[in-house]
Each structure stands twice: as structure tokens, then as C-alpha cells.
Image (cartoon, grey):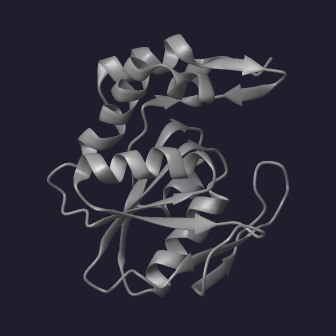
Amino acid sequence: MTTAAHDALMTHFRWEGGHADMWRVFADAEAFAAVLDGLVEPWRGRGVTRVVGIESRGFVLGGATAVALGVGFVAIRKPGGLLPEPKHVVDSDADYRGRRHQLRMQGVLSPEDRVVLVDDWAEQGSQAWAARRLVESAGATFLGVAPLVDQLPAAARGRLGDVTAVARAEELGPAR
């Protein structure tokens, strides 16, 4: 994690109506570039061949991270989103709202792929765990998770590989 990434996140992040507003970070080109650098830097030189991201903010961050790493991006969709011929499907554990999701991914990964998941926030780890299972069901290697904000409990962190976040949730203060 870079100091510039951390500073950009802390400057542009807001709580709005009790919810995390990450869109403000993306709206400022310099802040967005800084947080992307913070997401990318720990994974440079580690043999990443693909980045996966869960909709919706995982698409924004994952796609940009993939371009910065010079690798492809693979979308993980929730129900209702267009995804031609999904080849891999898993059900997630309950997320931070108590909802379970069926996550889907096209069959584009191979056993040679080394994959990192990029997202805006990792709270319970249920969707990250489901993403890991999707990646591994394709025979690929799951390297870890790169969230902007890490709020993972120790038990979840232990099953997700390397976790390289720009900030810890407690640094953002309580939701308001």
C-alpha cells in the first residue's frame, strides 16, 4: 500500500446515510489513480495473469487494476446480470446484509492462471470466499484479495490468501 493511495482514500471517502460512498474516490482522477496504484503495487512481479472483480465496484477497480498489471479481467456476476454461458457457479455465504448470492463466471480461466480478486470493501469475506471457489473450480490458482478497505475477521482472512488493502475499516471511523 502506498501512502498516496491511503491519503487519497482518506481524503475522498465519505459515509452517506450510514453507507460507504466509494464513488467519490473514483470521481477524482488523481485520487482514483492513487488508489489504483495502491491496489496494484503489492501484486507487481507476483505472476498475476488475471484479475477478477465482483459487480459493481469490483468491475471498476478490477478492470483498471488488470490494465495496470497488463493482464485480462474476468467479471463475476450476481443474479440478473447478463453473462453469456456461465461455466462456473457458486453460492456465497451470507454477506454483510445477510444476503446470499449466486455468483457466476464465464469459463475463461485455465490451470495456468494466477488470479487476484479486486474489490472496494472486504467485510465478512463471504463473496471473496465464493470468488476463490469460482477461480479454483476453473483449475486456476487464487493468490489473494486486493480491497480498498479491509474489514475481514481473522477467520475469513485465513482462507483468502494474501490480503493487501489500501486501508483498514477502523481507520474510516464509524458509519454515520
Residue 146 visible in the shown view:
no
Left or right: 25 with respect to 125?
left
Residue plotted at (61% across, 70% down): 130
Query: Which residue occupies 50% across, 64% down?
Result: 159
Residue farthest left in this picture: 45
The residue lying at 83 percent from left, 49 percent from top is: 97
Q: Quadrant of the N terminus?
A: top left
Nearest to the observer: residue 33 or residue 117: 33
> Is 92 on the left or on the right of 54, as rendered?
right
Quadrant showing the C terminus: top right
Residue 86: x and y in percent read 60, 84
Point out residue 112 in the picture as x, y percentages from the top left corner.
25, 82
Residue at (52% x, 65% y) in the render: 75
Q: State whether residue 36 is above or below residue 47.
A: above
Q: In this view, does 138 lie above or below 95?
A: below
Residue 25 in the image, given as x and y percentages of width and height: 53, 24
Residue 61 percent coordinates (x, y): 47, 44
- Of 99 and 104, nearer the camera is 104
Q: In which quarter of the image is residue 170?
A: top right
- Is 44 placed left or right of 136 in the picture? left
Q: In this view, does 33 lie above or below 4?
A: below
